[in-house]
Amino acid sequence: MSSTASEDHAYFQAIEAVFVRLRGTPFLLSPADWRLASAWYREGIPLAVVEAALEEVFTRRAERGEVGKVQSLRYCAAAVEAAWSRHLELQSGGVPVGAVALVVADRLAALARALPATEAGTGSRIRALAGDAEEVERRLAALDRELLRRAEERLSPASRAELDARVEETLAALGERLPAPELEAYRPHLRDRELRRRAGLPLLSLFAPEAMRPADADEPVS
């Protein structure tokens, strides 16, 4: 994995999206959680391995009948490391790292369906992407930045002011728990997330919840 800022940010966002989906309620990863995800990224753990480990943790919690919400990604750290160890063991037996069942074309089609009608052109570009999962993920990250830039350009001055005010509210609410430098580092992430929410944009990642939605989930029930 090449360590560019855009790629590692997409990696973190994808992990956050999966964690929030499994948790079942909105949640903001803490700086400590992001540092943990950063360590996984530097170690080269594929997103699919992290996703499978998170799924396993939440499935086992449900089977045990545990109540309460998981409050940190760190709760899943041991499971991720164990899954990665198993993956490396399989590699030594002839299965290459990253050989996780993933139909890229299906996930790209699901992402395209999740876009608003105003982004039909982007949907066509997404469907046309080809290559291995890592290459596609890099190109999706670039398209994601384009989407957010256009969404920003469409904002009226009043809407932009509302968005900024919402970000400041969230930062203020976190102010008692996090030091100022970490809060400031969160600002771009929070702003992108609020912009994405207002524009109705999915995170363009093969591991976003929208990418894993089956085609019939988008069809109206008769």
Image: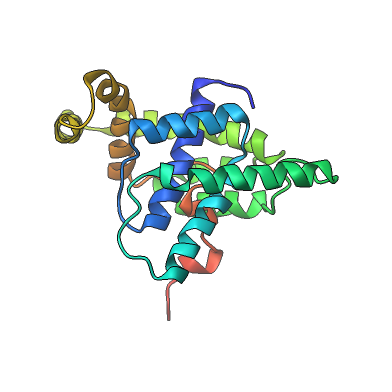
Give the total number of marks visible in the rendering: 0
In this rendering, the answer to whether 207 lies above or below 32 is: below
Please provide percent x and percent y for residue 85.
67, 43
Q: Nearer the viewer, residue 44 or 70?
A: 70
Please provide percent x and percent y for residue 190.
29, 33
Please provide percent x and percent y for residue 15.
47, 42
Please indicate whether residue 91 sits to the left or right of residue 143 in the image: right
Please indicate whether residue 164 sits to the left or right of residue 41 in the image: left
In this rendering, the answer to whether 160 lies above or below 123 is: above
**Residue 213 visible in the current orientation:** yes
**Residue at the image position 49 percent from the left and 43 percent from the top:** 77
Please provide percent x and percent y for residue 56.
54, 58
The C terminus is located in which quarter? bottom left
**Residue at the image position 67 percent from the left and 52 percent from the top:** 102
Q: Nearer the viewer, residue 172 or 61?
A: 61
**Residue 219 visible in the current orientation:** no
The N terminus is located in which quarter? top right
**Residue at the image position 46 percent from the left and 33 percent from the top:** 36
Q: Nearer the viewer, residue 179 or 5?
A: 179
What is the residue that sits farthest to the right in this orientation? Answer: 94
Picture quadrant where residue 160 is located = top left
